[in-house]
């Protein structure tokens, strides 16, 4: 069978989502680093439809601003029901014929495979409507699928259902494949003669059935996939389901996840085989980790790149690049622009920002390193603070290759410490240190003999 390409996918996203109690529109709430609408569009795009329409209404500017690629917004001025929403969308593509897929914008776990199967079933049976249904333990609130002799007759919304119908555990998921022409015809005939006074998309099924058209149904293999989000508790539930799905896939691909329940990995994160992830680790955004790296415990990385066999523990990092076999942590704070070379080290209680630290160079302890470039094989002593900000401007500090910055230095930018140069412990370095020189930026120590006896006599004694 040729792979079916729908003429259009219509995503329903005009509703307000009041139960989220949020200023953010419901479909823009995120899980695993992508909005609900983003997940749905991702699945929809895999079908490669000619048209990808998103019906927007509430917070339309905000929702529309997130659309990329082929997706195009269609405004539904007032939310008169799911059937009305689809009609408004179809009116913008009057000449389109073929298969029209409809998905709700708040079902983020739907997969492309499930949509693909639905479209294939629809084509195979040459149906007017093919709906995706699910069998659930608690169907409260959903439309019930009424069958007769096994075949679907209609969907009855929960609010319109009598007690016997409410016993039905097979529900409509709001995911459909329609044939455009009979869909357009049925949408013209929808009424608002129901409990919610809305034009129900679900009524298309009864209309098609009454007209003697073929109505087919595909039962979802995984009912979780079809779950919608109406409130924050459901969002958290689905985030957990998605977390398990993502972690399981990485484990199949060879990643060692020691504690799946406390490991959160965004959808776009890339992990090579033999990466080891210890408990309480969150990997966000476009983070990429090479083979054999060890992350965690207690580590959060956002948009970071980690080299082969690097080790990062108890660290918070954003937009940092960590070289192969480098070590970071514990308790390191990597801010944007941190680049650590191969075999380099950023150690305990070190904060870095816009810091390029070369291969084999180390910032082992208790330092702030901002706007600095360090060459190769250099060491920054414990407690070094880069004084990069004069209150008005940021300045850059440079350390060459094979240099040794002493402990407890203040490097007052802009300043350069040369190749093979040293600085004395406790120095405030305000001037460049030439290659091979020792920079001493402090007073020499002097000892005052007999001071204690003169100034701090023991109790009862006179000063000497
Ligand atoms: C809908 C179905 C129900 C199904 C359930 C599955 C109808 C009448 N009912 O009910 O059978 O079991 O989904 O989750 O279709 N929307 C618009 N414009 C509107 C109204 C809704 O764009 O005028 C959007 C909403 O933003 C939402 C989607 O359509 O994304 C579904 O609407 P919602 O009100 O949540 O329908 P349900 O009551 O959940
Ligand atoms: Ca809903």
Image (tube, helix red, strand yellow):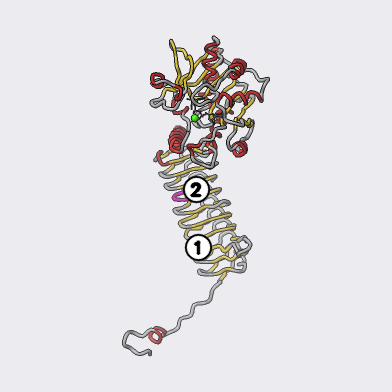
- State the residue position of label 2: 325
Viewer-nearest residue: 293 or 330: 330
Would the CB of label 2 be found within 8 Å of ligand 1? no
Q: Nearer the viewer, mark 2 or mark 1?
A: 1
Whether residue 124 is situated above or below residue 313 in the rendered picture: above
Picture disc at residue 30: none
Q: Is 432 situated left or right of 448 in this image?
A: right
- State the residue position of label 1: 381
Viewer-nearest residue: 38 or 136: 136
Whichever of callouts 2 and 1 sits on the residue coming sooner in the sequence is 2
Viewer-nearest residue: 295 or 284: 284
From the top left corner, tell me how far across and down residue 80 is, in percent: 57, 28
Q: Residue at x 62, y 26 (%)?
A: 89
Magenta part, dominant SS: strand
What residue span does the magenta drawing correspond to?
Answer: 312-317
The quadrant where residue 179 appears: top right
Residue 250 visible to the viewer: no
Whether residue 428 is situated above or below residue 176 in the rendered picture: below
From the top left corner, tell me how far across and down residue 87 is, in percent: 61, 23
């Amino acid at each position: 069978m040729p792979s079916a390409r729908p003429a259009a996918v219509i995503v329903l996203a005009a509703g307000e989502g009041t139960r989220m109690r949020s200023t953010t529109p419901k479909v823009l709430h995120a899980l695993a680093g992508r909005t609900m609408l983003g997940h749905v569009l991702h699945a929809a795009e895999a079908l490669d439809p000619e048209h990808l329409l998103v019906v927007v209404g509430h917070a339309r500017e905000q929702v529309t601003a997130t659309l990329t690629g082929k997706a195009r917004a269609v405004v539904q001025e007032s939310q008169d029901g799911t059937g009305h929403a689809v009609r408004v969308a179809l009116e913008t593509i009057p000449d389109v014929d073929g298969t029209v897929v409809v998905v709700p914008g708040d079902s983020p776990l739907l997969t492309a495979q499930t949509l693909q199967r639905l479209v294939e079933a629809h084509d195979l049976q040459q149906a007017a409507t093919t709906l995706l249904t699910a069998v659930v333990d608690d169907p409260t609130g959903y439309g019930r699928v009424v069958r007769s002799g096994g075949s679907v007759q209609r969907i009855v919304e929960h609010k319109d259902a009598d007690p016997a119908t409410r016993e039905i555990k097979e529900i409509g998921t709001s995911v459909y494949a329609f044939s455009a022409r009979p869909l357009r015809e049925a949408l013209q005939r929808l009424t608002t003669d129901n409990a919610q006074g809305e034009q129900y998309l679900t009524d298309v099924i009864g209309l098609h059935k009454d007209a003697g058209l073929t109505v087919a149904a595909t039962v979802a293999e995984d009912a979780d996939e079809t779950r919608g989000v109406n409130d924050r508790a459901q969002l958290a539930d689905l985030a957990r389901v998605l977390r398990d799905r993502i972690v399981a896939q990485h484990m199949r691909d060879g990643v060692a996840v020691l504690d799946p329940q406390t490991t959160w990995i965004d959808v776009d994160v890339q992990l090579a085989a033999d990466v080891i992830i210890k408990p309480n680790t969150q990997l966000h955004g476009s983070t990429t980790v090479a083979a054999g790296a060890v992350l965690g415990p207690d580590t959060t990385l956002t948009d970071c790149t980690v080299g082969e066999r690097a080790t990062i523990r108890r660290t918070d990092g954003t937009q940092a690049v960590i070289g192969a076999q480098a070590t970071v942590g514990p308790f390191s704070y990597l801010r944007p622009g941190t680049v650590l070379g191969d075999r380099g080290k950023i150690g305990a209680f070190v904060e870095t920002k816009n810091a390029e630290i070369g291969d084999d160079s180390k910032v082992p302890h208790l330092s702030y390193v901002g706007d600095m470039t360090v060459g190769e094989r250099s060491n920054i002593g414990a407690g070094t603070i880069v004084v990069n900000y004069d209150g008005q401007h940021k300045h850059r500090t440079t350390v060459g290759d094979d240099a040794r910055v002493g402990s407890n230095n203040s490097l007052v930018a802009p300043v350069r410490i040369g190749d093979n140069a040293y600085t004395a412990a406790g120095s405030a370095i305000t001037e460049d240190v030439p290659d091979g020189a020792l920079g001493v930026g402090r007073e020499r120590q002097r000892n005052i003999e007999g001071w204690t006896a003169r100034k701090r006599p023991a109790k009862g004694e006179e000063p000497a």
